[in-house]
């Protein structure tokens, strides 16, 4: 049970869920990956443009609950402009935070605004909504790695 | 009827401070059911049909008496027409394999409605693909109902099987199954009725309906989880091959060949959930004592009240037929601009349990042009206070989202 609803439905999450500048198509995207939770009907498409090792641009389209939409938008804010290695680090820290493996505020600083989802673990039914974009992004990074190995 | 007295019998409602509005998923269980299961394991537990000793005979008797009780409850001609399964899903899979696979040919059609639960849809996709027959759908009108015209245009001379839910688990629409059966029989098709969402609320008479098959789950009608029923007309069941093979469903087993037991055992392979069956028997006793008339009266009053309260919000979209007499006690809704999962989470923090999602009915969601809905499903043990709590939660949800919508 959530102690206070506003711990989860906080201003940052609500604002991103209602309107996001990251909700857009990316022209000439290098990667386009669908993510979905079939049980909820949440569906997103992440698009990413690389410049060498750097994530130059990112956007998403799709639909879903406030948590999944805001999480996608905030993730993009957090990793756009970073290198693939940095992005991986941020994603793994975010996932560890959701699983409550990392609680140290200092360590969580690197995920910037995404710290807004810290309390989602109090709402176990919604954890998968918060993780959807991040797992989808992991798939993209895996593909980019597999590609570079070829 | 004293609702307080009814609620006292549902221990969970005493133990948890919650407005439980998800009885369409599974109902809570009265003390009588829990006690019957407990007593079975404390006094009668043995493997039925096996031992020559008294305890096993008593277990067998309890199991078979419940079969007779169910036959009387749905007015089956004979108790062999009642087959125990795990749940409605397993009953429907049995029919898909043992009837569908055996009888469908290339030019044949299976007709189902767009409001079927996945359990009465995916098995038919599988069978029609394997037999290269056709699966077609009866669609609903803007009042979320099947019209006679739609029924007659979809059930044709090619139709061999019609699968229809008695009450939609999403819309609460009560389908005209008797009329569908009558028409399908004229066209030479057999009809399978999914009564999972109807039998908790209304009297089922398989002979009056003239249903060829009818399935339901025990756990949606006060019984324990893990026990379901398949009713089938004896003359059809007798011609069907077994579904699962193993112990208890055989007569003689040789190294290379087997002869199968007669009905109903031939469809009940392996040791059954006897404790669950006994619990289902106690659930039927409970419902008989309370009576469908009382159940109907309480549930319809609650539904009227819920519909009246919910329809006062201009941001509310209700997926409910305007014809009250065709609607059961399931209410699907969406709040404009707010995703059902957010609604359900915020209601949960308000101690209201509803379901959100596609309700195992993705084709229906697509037809309704949404990806999910909120669903409150009522039972006779609910109260007006439960509905008030739901309404308060909805108002709270809207307030939370409203301030961000204006930007």
Image: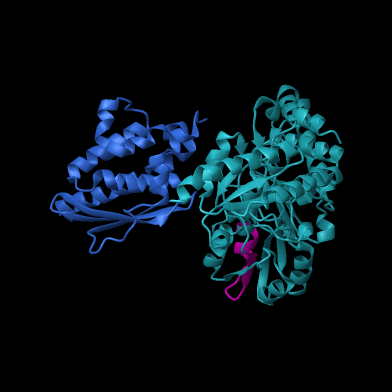
Chain colours: A blue, B cyan
* Front-lying residue, B119 or B197: B197
Split into 4 quadrants, where in the image is the N terminus of chain B?
top right
Q: Residue at x 72, y 53 (%)?
A: B195
Q: Is residue B112 found inside the magenta-colored segment of the image?
A: yes
Above-or-below relation of A28 to B24: below
Residue B272 in sight in this render: no
Q: Is residue B302 above or below residue A123?
A: below
Q: Residue B25, percent across and down? A: 63, 44
Rendered location of residue B15, percent (x, y): 67, 25
Residue closest to the far left: A52
Along the line of sight, the residue nearer the viewer: B300 or B237 = B300
Give the left or right position of residue B305, taking residue A125 as reference: right
Q: Is residue A13 magenta?
A: no
In the image, farthest residue toward the top: B42
Give the residue at x 70% y 42%. Answer: B218
Instruction: Work out whether A107 lies above or below B250.
Output: above
**Which percent across, then down, holds residue B157?**
69, 77
Stretch in magenta: B97-113
**How many marks on residues?**
0
Most foreground residue, A105 or B124: A105
| Residue B322 makes an appearance in the image | yes
The image quarter containing residue A84 is top left
In the rendered image, which quarter is residue B232 located in?
A: bottom right
Q: What residue is shown at x 77% (from left), y 27% (from top)?
A: B8
Of residues B70 and B367, the one nearer the viewer is: B367
Compared across the picture, whether A90 is left or right of B167 comes to left
């Amino acid at each position: 049970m959530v102690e206070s609803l506003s711990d989860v439905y906080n201003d940052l999450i609500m604002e991103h869920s209602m309107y996001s500048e990251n909700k857009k198509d990316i022209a000439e995207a290098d990667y386009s990956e669908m993510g979905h939770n079939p049980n909820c009907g949440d569906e997103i498409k992440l698009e990413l443009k690389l410049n060498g090792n750097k994530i130059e641009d990112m956007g998403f389209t799709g639909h879903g609950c406030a948590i999944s939409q805001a999480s996608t938008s905030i993730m993009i804010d957090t990793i756009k402009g970073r290198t693939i290695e940095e992005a991986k680090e941020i994603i793994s820290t975010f996932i560890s935070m959701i699983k409550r493996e990392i609680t140290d505020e200092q360590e969580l600083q690197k995920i910037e605004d995404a710290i807004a989802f810290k309390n989602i673990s109090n709402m176990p039914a919604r954890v998968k909504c918060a993780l959807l974009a991040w797992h989808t992004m992991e798939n993209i990074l895996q593909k980019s790695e597999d590609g570079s190995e070829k | 009827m004293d609702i307080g007295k009814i609620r006292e019998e549902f221990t969970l409602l005493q133990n948890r401070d919650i407005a439980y509005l998800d009885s369409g998923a599974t109902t809570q269980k009265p003390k009588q059911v829990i006690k019957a299961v407990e007593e079975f394991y404390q006094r009668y537990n043995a493997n039925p049909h096996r031992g020559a000793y008294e305890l096993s005979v008593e277990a067998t008797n309890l199991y078979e008496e419940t079969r007779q009780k169910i036959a009387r409850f749905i007015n089956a001609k004979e108790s062999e027409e009642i087959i125990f399964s795990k749940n409605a899903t397993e009953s429907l899979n049995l029919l898909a394999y043992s009837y569908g696979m055996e009888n469908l040919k290339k030019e044949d059609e299976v007709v189902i409605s767009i409001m079927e639960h996945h359990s009465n849809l995916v098995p038919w996709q599988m069978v029609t693909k394997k037999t290269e027959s056709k699966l077609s759908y009866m669609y609903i009108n803007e009042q979320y109902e099947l019209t006679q015209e739609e029924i007659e245009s979809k059930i044709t001379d090619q139709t061999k099987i019609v699968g229809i839910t008695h009450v939609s688990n999403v819309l609460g629409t009560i389908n005209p199954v008797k009329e569908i059966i009558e028409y399908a029989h004229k066209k030479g098709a057999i009809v399978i009725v999914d009564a999972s969402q109807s039998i908790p609320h209304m009297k089922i008479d398989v002979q009056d309906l003239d249903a060829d098959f009818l399935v339901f789950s025990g756990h949606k009608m006060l019984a324990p989880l893990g026990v379901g029923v398949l009713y089938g007309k004896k003359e059809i069941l007798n011609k069907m091959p077994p579904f699962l093979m193993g112990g208890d469903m055989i007569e003689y087993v040789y190294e290379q060949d087997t002869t199968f037991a007669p009905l109903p055992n031939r469809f009940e392979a392996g040791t059954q959930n006897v404790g669950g069956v006994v619990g289902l028997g106690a659930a039927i006793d409970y419902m008989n004592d309370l009576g469908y008339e009382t159940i109907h009266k309480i549930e319809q009053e609650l539904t009227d009240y819920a519909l009246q309260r919910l329809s006062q919000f201009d941001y509310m979209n209700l997926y409910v037929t305007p014809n009250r007499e065709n609607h059961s006690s399931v209410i699907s809704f969406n709040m404009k601009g707010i995703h059902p999962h957010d609604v359900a989470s915020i209601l949960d923090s308000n101690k209201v349990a509803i379901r959100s999602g596609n309700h195992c009915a993705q084709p229906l969601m697509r037809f309704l042009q949404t990806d999910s809905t909120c669903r409150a499903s009522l039972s006779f043990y609910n109260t007006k206070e439960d509905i008030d709590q739901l309404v308060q939660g909805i108002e709270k949800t809207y307030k939370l989202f409203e301030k961000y919508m204006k930007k």
